[in-house]
Each structure stands twice: as C-alpha cells, then as structure tokens.
Amino acid sequence: MVRWRAGTVTALRRRWTGAVELDVEVTGGTMRALAYPALVGDPEVGDRVLLNAGALLMGLGTGGYALVVALPDRLPPDPPEALDSRDAGHLVKARYTPLQPILLGVDEEASPHHETLATAADLAGLPVVTADLHSALPAIVAGVRADAPQARVAYLLTDGGALPAWFSRTLAGLRDDLVGTISVGQAFGGDLEASTLHSGLLAARHVLGADVAVVAQGPGNLGTGTPWGFSGVAVGEAVNAIATLGGRPVGSLRISAADPRPRHRGVSHHSLTAYGRVALARAELVVPDGLEPALAAEVDAALAPLAARHRVLRVDTTGLDEALRRSPVTLSTMGRGLDADHAYFLAAAAAGRHAGLLTRQ
C-alpha cells in the first residue's frame, strides 16, 4: 500500500509541461520527487509536502521519483469554473482515488465538440499505429515524418502505464510534432480528454483532423512474467477498436536482439499475444527490412502463425536510421538507447513509415 513521507522542498529542478522535479528533505535524507501543479499546486522552496514514496522505495518504475500528494500548508485555489456550472467538465478520471481530477471530456455535453462526436460514424480509413510501449512513440513519429513530413499526427495515451500525460518528458519534447494528445480511459492530462479509446479515436480524426494516430500506453509498463499478466494486452483490444470504427490498424512490433529476457528477444511475447490472441480484427504488422539475418529469421518464424489473421509486410528502412537520430527527444527503452537496441526502434519507425505512406494513397 502507500508508504507515506513528509518533508520540505529544498530545491526546484527540471520543469516540463505539467510537471516539476523537486528535492525534498525527509527524515533520513533527501528524496527526488515529482509534482503535478495542476493537481497539487506549484511548489516552492520551503513548502512542506506530503509524498507517496512507495514505488521509489521499492525500486519500481516511477522514473525514480516520490510523488507529491499535497502542499498541505498552501493548497491551490479551486478551478475558476463553478463545479455546478453547465459549462464545467464532469469527466472523472483516476476515479475514487484521492487525487481524482474532474475534467471536461471532449465527448461530453458541455464540450464544444459534443455534436461532432455525437454524429461521427467512423474513422474513414485513418491509419492508426498500435504499440506496446511508450518508448516506441518518438520512433513511430520519426518514421511518419520520414516520408510524410506534413502529416498531422495525434497520440492517444491509454491507461496501461502512467496515467498523467504530464509524467512524459517524451510528450513535452514532441509537442511540435503532434497535432495533439488525447488521454483516454483513466489517463488524463492530454490536450483533449476522452472517456474511452473509441471516442478518443473519433476525436483524433474529427476534432484534431489527424492524418495518422498512434495508440500506446504512457511511460511505464505492468508486467508479471506470466503469459497474460501485462498491460500490453490492450494493444490487441486497440486493434479491435480501430477496426470496429473503420480505421486501418498498423501494428508496431516489439522486436529486440538486445533484451536480456528470452521472452522479449526476437518478437516479444507481448506482441505475439496481443496481435495473435487478443486482436480479433485484421491488422498490418510491419517488419523492418535490414535486420541482422539471424534476427530476421527468428522474427519470420515467430510471425508465421499470425499470417493467417493479419497481413505481415516488410517495409524498406532506407533513411530511417537518420530519421531516428534526428528525433527531438532521446530514444530509450528499458534503459537502452538507439544503438544498444537498434532493432526495437527500427521496427517502430518502420510502422510509422508505413502509416505515413498510407496517407499518400
């Protein structure tokens, strides 16, 4: 459960969209902490803070932070809109937790986009790239930009990883490359809020005017080392949602020759399970050309059983390495950069390239 700590802010460090990094003096030392000003207010040196330090103390995937729960001596003011106003949002996310935010959903009645989404019927063939990990996002965007530099790319943040979009420094660095972020399900903090992935997809197409969309969870990943106990199963469910709405699912495969865990080498079991067992609709699964021969053979063998349901296609990777190296954000997955896990990022970029090329057809 929660491991509480109380302390005093001694330093303000990095700041990016929606988040600020702090040093907090607690009994026994100093903790690096993260605050979301939209939830708890803007901390200052000398403020007393309450922290949820459990994941940090246990060494779990919080990016190395305790999380600020409150500035108890300097609470932020209420939002300017009256809570009972007809124009206020009523979409509650992270529901029934102590920090549940109440937001204006793009699809609720008070939204200026409600009528658009109430009548939106389908995605009209919108290419949508699905990926297991948040770290694939900048590589997918680089692949789209390689051949379709003017394409309008929207990102749908699902709730398998970090719920606040503000946690992602990747998103802060990609703001000029995305037409917008839509947080769906329990996730929040995007440019638009949607109650479900389905309404989020429709908002990407009909509100943001996206030419390409990317669906992936936020930073972090739940995995238990069991066949079904990982948050990436939602990738298969995303394929089903995209196809149901008349979109074109493009599967980014999690491919690696560097991951030390056998279940993630070659094609990760996460991809094989999500696309092979969960996705009931047809997707286009992209394999990048240029893999090392042994890895390519392993990938082909792993994907052979999926070919009956999905279209498995190879995509030329000429120029994608250069595109990846031009990424405005650092590429990193599980602590490995571009050169340490080149196949992983190349596969994501190839999926982005394929989606980008579909916009030109």
Image (tube, rainbow, N blue to C red):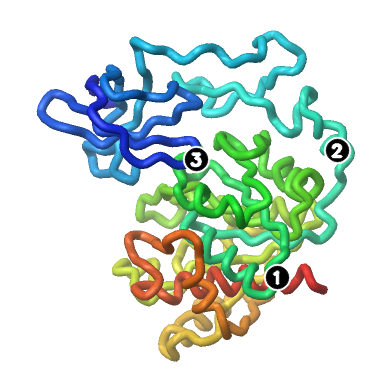
Which residue type carries mark 3?
A: Thr
Q: Residue at the spot x=85%, y=35% of the render?
A: 118
Q: Image quarter for residue 98?
A: top left
Q: Position of residue 115 (x, y in %)?
A: 87, 33
Q: Residues within 10 Å of mark 3 (few under 14, many from 20)?
A: some
Q: Vertically, is 186 above or below 179? A: above
Query: Nearest the camera: 54 or 39?
Result: 39
Which residue type carries mark 1?
A: Ala
Q: Which element type, helix, strand or loop, lies under badge 1?
A: loop
Disc number for residue 211: none
- In screen coordinates, is 22 left or right of 294? left
Q: Residues within 10 Å of mark 1 (few under 14, many from 20)?
A: many
Q: Which element type, helix, strand or loop, lies under badge 3?
A: loop
- In screen coordinates, is 302 left or right of 73? right
Which dot, 1 or 2, sits closer to the camera? 1
- The quadrant of the rendering that contains the N terminus is top left
Query: Nearest the camera: 261 or 163?
Result: 163
- The answer to which of marks 1 and 2 sits earlier in the sequence is 2
Q: Which element type, helix, strand or loop, lies under badge 2?
A: helix
Q: Residue at the spot x=59%, y=74% of the render?
A: 350
- The answer to which of marks 1 and 3 sits earlier in the sequence is 3
Disc number for residue 17: 3
Disc 2: which residue: 116
Q: Position of residue 221 (x, y in %)?
A: 42, 50
Disc number for residue 148: 1
